[in-house]
């Protein structure tokens, strides 16, 4: 029963770290990365569709992204979606392909992005702590219903704290890597 709860809790914590990593991938650094625009939602025939389902996205150069739509008719829709997104990028279109030039980040913008990274890492830590709190409530419930002994409860509580610390540390490492990537020129 305790092992099952711990497995379930660890799965949720692992998912929280994965969500943070995916979220940070969409933050713009000085380098072009297809992940930057993959989640841009394009209004494709009235249906919001992620850009990566409508086009091939590649980074042929460190400061350039190219977007080649599968359907040439969707070029204008993709361009409009990129302009509407919060990326602050202006698409250049030659009728077949969209080019996005990624400008170099200013020092001020880099510091702003680092603050955003720290905020998102903190949100991830809060998510991990919420998962821990829920698991702890389940453990207390098990003890109250006499499904586990008091010793088992305290042992499981210590294990839960170790698990929490390990995943919070992973989140810190993910955030640190992203900060270094943003601050590198």
Image (tube, grey):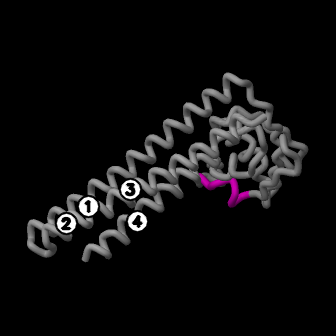
Q: Marks 4 and 3, how far apart in space?
A: 9 Å
Mark 4 lies on residue: 10
* Circle 1 crowding by C-alpha within 10 Å: few under 14, some 14–19, many from 20: some
x and y, in percent, of residue 180 in the image: 67, 40
Can you give x and y, in whole percent of width and height, for residue 110 in the image?
A: 67, 29
The numbered mark, 4 or 3, whose residue comes first in the sequence reads: 4
Q: Quadrant of the N terminus?
A: bottom left
Task: Give the residues in magenta.
Answer: 48-54
Residue depicted at 36% across the width and 65% down the height: 9
Q: Quadrant of residue 52?
A: bottom right
Please provide percent x and percent y for residue 164.
38, 56
Q: CA distance from mark 2 to mark 1?
A: 6 Å
Question: Disc 3 to disc 1, how far (Cα)?
Answer: 10 Å
Q: Which residue is mark 2?
A: 153
Residue under label 3? 164
- Earlier along the polypeptide chain: callout 3 or callout 2? 2
| Measured Cα–Cα span from mark 4 to mark 1 | 14 Å
Q: Are marks 2 and 4 in contact (CB under 8 Å)?
A: no
Residue of label 1: 157
* Position of 139 relative to 2 (above/below): above
Give the foreground label among 4 and 3: 3
């Amino acid at each position: 029963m305790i092992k099952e709860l711990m497995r379930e809790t660890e799965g949720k914590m692992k998912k929280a770290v994965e969500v943070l990593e995916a979220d940070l991938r969409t933050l713009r650094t000085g380098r072009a990365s297809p992940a930057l625009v993959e989640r841009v939602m394009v209004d494709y025939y009235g249906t919001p569709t992620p850009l990566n389902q409508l086009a091939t996205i590649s980074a042929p150069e460190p400061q350039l992204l190219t977007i080649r739509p599968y359907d040439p008719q969707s070029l204008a829709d993709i361009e409009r979606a990129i302009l509407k997104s919060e990326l602050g990028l202006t698409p250049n279109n030659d009728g077949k392909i969209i080019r996005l030039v990624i400008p170099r980040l200013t020092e001020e913008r880099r510091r702003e992005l680092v603050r955003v990274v720290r905020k998102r890492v903190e949100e991830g830590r809060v998510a991990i702590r919420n998962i821990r709190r829920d698991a702890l409530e389940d453990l207390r419930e098990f003890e109250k219903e006499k499904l586990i002994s008091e010793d088992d409860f305290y042992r499981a509580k210590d294990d839960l704290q170790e698990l929490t610390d390990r995943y919070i540390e992973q989140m810190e490492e993910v955030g640190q890597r992203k900060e270094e990537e943003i601050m590198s020129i």
